[in-house]
Amino acid sequence: MPEQSSLSEHAPDMVVVGTGLAGLSLALRFAEHGHVTVLAKADFTYGSSLYAQGGIAAVLDPEDSLAAHVADTLDAGAGLCHRDAVEFIVSEAPAAIAWLIARGVSFTAQDGSYHLTREGGHTHRRVIHAADATGRAVETTLADLARRHPRIRILEHHIAVDLVTAHKLGLPGPNRCLGLYVLDKRTGQVHAIASRLTALATGGASRAYLYSSNPDTSTGDGIAMAWRAGCRVANLEFVQFHPTCLYHPQAKSFLISEAVRGEGGHLLRPDGSRFMLEYDPRGELAPRDIVARAIDNEMKRGGLDAVGLDISHRGRDFIAAHFPNIYARCLTFGYDMAKGPIPVVPAAHYTCGGIMTDLHGRTDLAGLYAVGECAFTGLHGANRLASNSLLECLVLGASAAADASTRLDTAEPAALPPWDESRVTDADEGVVVAHNWEELRRFMWDYVGIVRTNRRLERALHRITVLASEIHDYYANFRVTNDLIELRNLAQVAELIIRSAQLRTESRGLHYSRDYPETDTTHSPRDTILTPGQFARATEPPGEWPR
């Protein structure tokens, strides 16, 4: 069979994998210095950023302060935030918001200034927003700019298969990223794209869990590819479960914004009684990990399918004005927020750990950057403060673009070998992929969820080892498809989450263990850092080339 074609003759200065806020922020800023190819896994604007509701945290009120934003972030992070990262990102927030406004993002105004809301963990109103659809407003604005930019080339429905490195090609000298292999989902062809620089902005891995607020594309692709290319990852045990997703069989875990509780929403038992003050003096405004565990405990203790979230006391006009999209969406499922509580459950929402980077987005591999949810900068610590994630995307997108622009002269592109499919065939049973996907998400939810134990983690590691072996054999013998690529990546990241959780012998932030229910105060807080090759059994043999 002939080898697949190559796009190396169109080598850009940078390939950006991902079209969320991190990827578009980086691409638009870098395009001032060089040509960019942007890979969209699905439609151009589809992804987690598009569905972000609450807003972007930034100190814009004279009564607020950078010191207060830093303190709130450190408090939510439960001792694991890196202060230098927090101070840098918080201090750059006002400039990042100004950059968005200058590009036409229409944030909600009130009384001649921008309306700021308050969310869980914040001591001030500092979340600037566009009604309850901030992600859509920002994403569509930047996507329109990218579409019209003469130096940005967009490839929709292209999913990255793996990174290409100098060492994997047997080239002499220091190792560096030379580009990547990409599957065109419309044709089934795999192309090689060489580039001077590569940036991963692929989002998180919440689709490793049965219930998630994320779109289907959140499969940990960037984290898995970077790991296979030799990059360290950190703190992947800290998976944030959003406390309030709409409970309805057709809702696909539709997110109910943190701002609903910030504006006075109450969490209720079936008898109408509030319970959050029994878990934390901040009540519904406690950080997400506390609220999610409280809801989980109430559901298990009472045998409940969901708990209630009630903001009806604020009145229909207030609700419709502040949460128009959430209000309308709930009505389509038969729930009127103005008449009474709506049913909510926790769901996997945000990956706080990721590929280790510095504050310029640089990874362990020369020529490779990582920004956004797939990266670990130290901002989020053991728990992400609400609305700091979009902020990190903006600030690190700008920082990475500035650094990358200084490295173009030292990053020469190399010719990449075409993808070889001469030894594989078409898959004979697609049901194998579907079955493994369902099994993985189920045992991750049951064994590596909001509350963990040593025995559950051991069971999960055993299951992922068996499952990963099947996936690897399937990958080695059949042509790649979108579902197979995503399953392979999810299995890899699931293993990293499990191993990270096993290494943390305490409860801290988003990681709660019944075997170690207390936070370790006898030692300084430490990050959980994993290095490729440190385990006796990995999901795939270290350094193995995919074809």
Image (cartoon, rainbow, N blue to C red):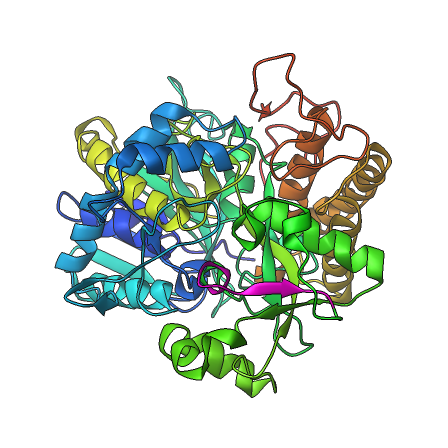
Span highlighted in magenta in the image: 260-269
Please give left or right for residue 112 compared with residue 484 in the image.
left
Image spot of residue 156 (x, y percent) = 38, 65
Q: Nearer the viewer, residue 45 or 415?
A: 45
Residue, x 72% and y 58% (percent of image)?
A: 437
Q: Is residue 339 above or below residue 539?
A: below
Q: Nearer the viewer, residue 4 or 210?
A: 210
Image spot of residue 306 (x, y percent) = 72, 67
Image spot of residue 234 (x, y percent) = 54, 29
Residue 254 seen in the current view = yes
Please give left or right for residue 88 compared with residue 206 in the image.
left
Quadrant for residue 515, please give it: top right
Residue 489 seen in the current view = no
Q: Is residue 202 above or below residue 104?
A: above
Q: Nearer the viewer, residue 134 or 310?
A: 310
Number of disc labels: 0
Please give left or right for residue 64 compared with residue 324 in the image.
left
The quadrant the N terminus occupies is bottom right
Q: Is residue 378 magenta?
A: no
The quadrant the C terminus occupies is top right
Q: Nearer the viewer, residue 542 or 525?
A: 525
Q: Is residue 268 magenta?
A: yes
Quadrant for residue 248, please give it: bottom right
Quadrant for residue 408, please give it: top left
Residue, x 83% and y 55% (percent of image)?
A: 301
Residue, x 60% and y 79% (percent of image)?
A: 340
Image spot of residue 490 (x, y percent) = 63, 49
Q: Is residue 506 above or below residue 497?
A: above
Residue, x 41% and y 56% (percent of image)?
A: 5
